[in-house]
Image (cartoon, helix red, strand yellow):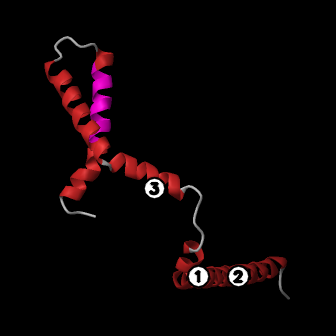
Amino acid sequence: MPTSNSVFNRFRFNLNTLTKTAHKEAMRNLIRTTLRTGLFLSLFGASLFAAAALPWETPLKTLQESLTGPIAKSIGVIAMAVAGGMLAFGGELGDFTKRIMMVVLAIAVMLLASSFVTGLGLP
């Protein structure tokens, strides 16, 4: 005659087995769903997302052309020369003025970075 302890052990063993089986099945379903979604997006993703033109594409393209045009390059060169000269030969500039000049110098470098990369022949 089984004792209550042995019945509990059998129940716990069955419960653990069911839990492990359910966990394995859930993982299989997750992997299948992930693979199906990846396959679907790789096959049809370009056609799904390329069809619609987003409303912010035109203003961003205009901003990109403005920041990489010849006027922006000349402003960048002038700002870099003035900020570098003030930092090098400024003498007794205050801490705030030095920080402002460093910010101007950093912005000038960012504006000139696209022409520098294009000049190297990189895309």
Q: Which residues are magenta?
A: 98-109
Per the image, label 1 sits on a secondary structure element best described as helix
Instruction: Give the alpha-carbon distance from disc 3 to disc 1, as whole Å.
Output: 39 Å
Q: Percent x, y for residue 32?
A: 61, 85
Name which quarter of the figure residue 22 lies in: bottom right
Residue at 84% across, 78% down? 4
The amino acid beneath tag 1 is Ile
Report the predominant secondary structure element of the magenta stretch: helix
Residue at 55% across, 78% down? 45
55 over 77 or under it: above or below: below
Per the image, label 2 sits on a secondary structure element best described as helix
Residue on which disc 3 sits: 61
Label 3: how many Cα within 10 Å (few below 14, some 14–19, many 20+): few
The amino acid beneath tag 3 is Lys
Q: Percent x, y for residue 43?
A: 53, 85
Per the image, label 3 sits on a secondary structure element best described as helix
Residue on which disc 2 sits: 22
Farthest residue in the front direction? 71
Pointers 3 and 1 in contact (C-beta within 8 Å) = no
Residue on which disc 1 sits: 31
Name which quarter of the figure residue 81 lies in: top left
Point out which mark residue 8 bears: none
Q: Percent x, y for residue 19?
A: 71, 79
